[in-house]
Image (cartoon, rainbow, N blue to C red):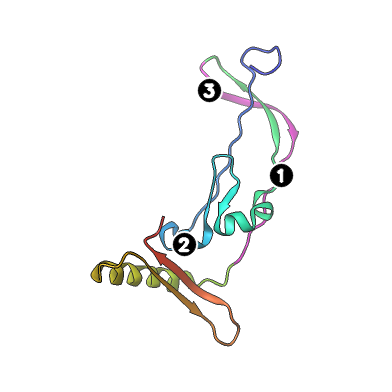
Amino acid sequence: TKGNFQGVYAEKTYKRYYPQPQPNAQIIGLTNSEGQGIEGLEMQLNKQLSGVDGEQKIIRDKRGNRLKVSEVIREGEPGENITLSIDSRLQYIMYRELTAAGVANNARSATAIAVDVKTGEILAMTSWPSY
C-alpha cells in the first residue's frame, strides 16, 4: 500500500538494449537492479544514459493485470543515445578469435585492442572470458 490506499503501489521499470552482449560486455558494463550503471560505460555515462523517470497512474484489476493508464502525471524523458568508435564486425571477430586462442592455449584470460593509428579511435576492444 501507498499512503492509506489499499492496492496502490509504486512500480519502477526500465529496459536497456545491449547489442552483441558477449563481445561488448567489458566495454558497455552493466547496471544494478535500480538501473544505475555500476561498471564500464554504463557507470561512466550513467547520467546521460538514464534520462528522467516519468510517472503515471495505472488502473489494475484485482489480479494486478493492467487495465489502462488513467493519468500521466509527468512525462519521462529518455536518456541520450551514445555512439562509439567501435566497429561491431571487427569487435565480434576479435572476440571470437580471442576466445578461440584463449581456449586453445589454456589461457586464464586474454585481452585485445585495435586502434586507428591516424585518429586514435578504438575500433575494437575485448577481453576473454567475458562476464
In the rendered view, tell whether residue 116 sits above or below residue 30. below
Mark 2 and mark 1: Cα distance apart in space: 26 Å
Q: Which amino acid, mark 2?
A: Asn
Give the mark, 3 or 2, whose residue is nearer the N terminus.
Answer: 2
In percent of the image, x 57 and y 72: which residue is there? 85
- Along the viewing direction, whichever of 118 and 57 lies nearer the viewer: 118
Instruction: Check the image and name the residue furthest to the bottom.
Output: 118
Residue 116 position within the rendered picture, expressed as x and y whole percent measured from the top left: 54, 83
Q: Are marks 2 and 1 in contact (CB under 8 Å)?
A: no
In the rendered view, tell whether residue 82 sits above or below residue 119. above
Residue 52 marker:
1
Residue 81 placement, left or right of 89: right
Q: Are marks 3 and 1 in contact (CB under 8 Å)?
A: no
In the rendered view, tell whether residue 104 sits above or below residue 56. below
Give the mark, 2 or 1, whose residue is nearer the N terminus.
Answer: 2
In percent of the image, x 44 and y 68: which residue is there? 126
Residue 32 position within the rendered picture, expressed as x and y whole percent measured from the top left: 54, 44
Query: What SS does tag 3 mark?
Result: loop
Query: What SS does tag 2 mark?
Result: helix
Crowding near the residue tagged with mark 3, few <14, some 14–19, many ≥20 C-alpha atoms within 10 Å: few
| Quadrant including the C terminus | bottom left
**In this picture, which residue range is highlighted in magenta?**
63-83
Q: Are marks 3 and 2 in contact (CB under 8 Å)?
A: no
Tell me the residue that label 3 is attached to. Answer: 65
Residue 65 position within the rendered picture, expressed as x and y whole percent measured from the top left: 53, 23
